[in-house]
Amino acid sequence: MPGLSRASARASRAVRLLLDRPDTAALLAEAWLSLAWSRLLLLFPFRRIAPMIGIPRSETEWREHPRELAQQIDRIADAVRIASRIAWWECKCLVRALAVIRMLKRRGIEYTLYLGTGRDEAGRLAAHAWLRSGSRFITGAEERNRFTVVGMYAAFGRSLDGP
C-alpha cells in the first residue's frame, strides 16, 4: 500500500476485516466515540470519575465466559484497538480501558479494572491500567506483569451463566 506506514496498513486491513461482519461499522463508531468520551473524562480528577468505573477494591470472578459472550467481548476489544489507531488524540492504556468499560456497561457485562504502578526501563515511576472480564484480559494484558496492582474497580453485570 503506497504511502501508508506499516501501522496504518495494518489498521487499514483490520478495519476492512472488521467491517466485513454485520453491524461492525456501528461497533467501530461506538468504539471511536467511547475513546473520545474516555479521553474527555481524564480532564477530571480521578476521584471524580472513579465512582463511574465500578466498586473500589472489588474484583469479579475468574471464570470462563460462554462462547458467544467471549466473542462479543473480543469484538469490542478489537473495535477499540482499531479505533485507537485512527483517533487523532492520545489513547493510552487508561483511555482504552475506559472505552471498553463504557461498551461493556452498555451491554451489562461485568469487568474488573486494575490500576498498577511500576518502573519503566529508565527506572522512572510508571502507571498502567488493564481490564479483565471473566478469565479474559481485554486491554493492557501484555504489560500487566511489570506492574503491582494498587487499585481495582469492579462492575457486576448480568449473570454470565446464561438466561
Image: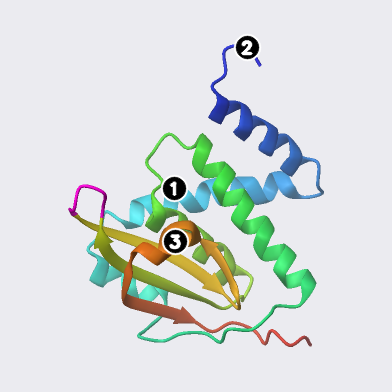
Q: Which residue is mark 2?
A: 2
Q: Which residue is mark 3?
A: 98
In the picture, measured across the screen, residue 158 lies left or right of residue 59, that is right
Report if residue 45 lies within the magenta region. no
Q: Find residue 133 and report its horizontal and vertical position in percent.
A: 57, 74
User: How is colour applied across the structure in the image?
Assistant: rainbow
SS of the residue at dot 3? helix
Choose the circle earlier in sequence order: 3 or 1: 1
What amino acid is found at the position of numbered circle 2 in the picture? Pro
Q: Which residue is mark 1?
A: 36
Q: Residue at x 56, y 87 (%)?
A: 61
Choose the circle earlier in sequence order: 1 or 2: 2
Q: Find residue 115 and report its horizontal and vertical position in percent.
A: 34, 69
Please identify the quadrant where the C terminus is shown: bottom right
What amino acid is found at the position of numbered circle 3 in the picture? Leu
Residues 143 and 30: in front is 143
Vertical comparison of 67 with 82: above or below: below
Choose the circle earlier in sequence order: 3 or 2: 2
Give the class, few, some or many, for how many residues have Cα within 10 Å of label 1's Cα (few <14, many ≥20). Answer: many
Q: Residue at x 77, y 50 (%)?
A: 23
Q: In this rendering, which labeled residue sits more in front, label 3 or label 1?
A: 3
Q: Residue at x 50, y 66 (%)?
A: 101
SS of the residue at dot 1? helix
Q: Which mark is residue 56?
A: none
Evaluate if marks 1 and 2 touch, with contact meaning CB atoms under 8 Å apart: no
| Dominant secondary structure (helix, strand or loop) of the stretch shown in magenta | loop
Q: Which residues are magenta?
A: 120-124
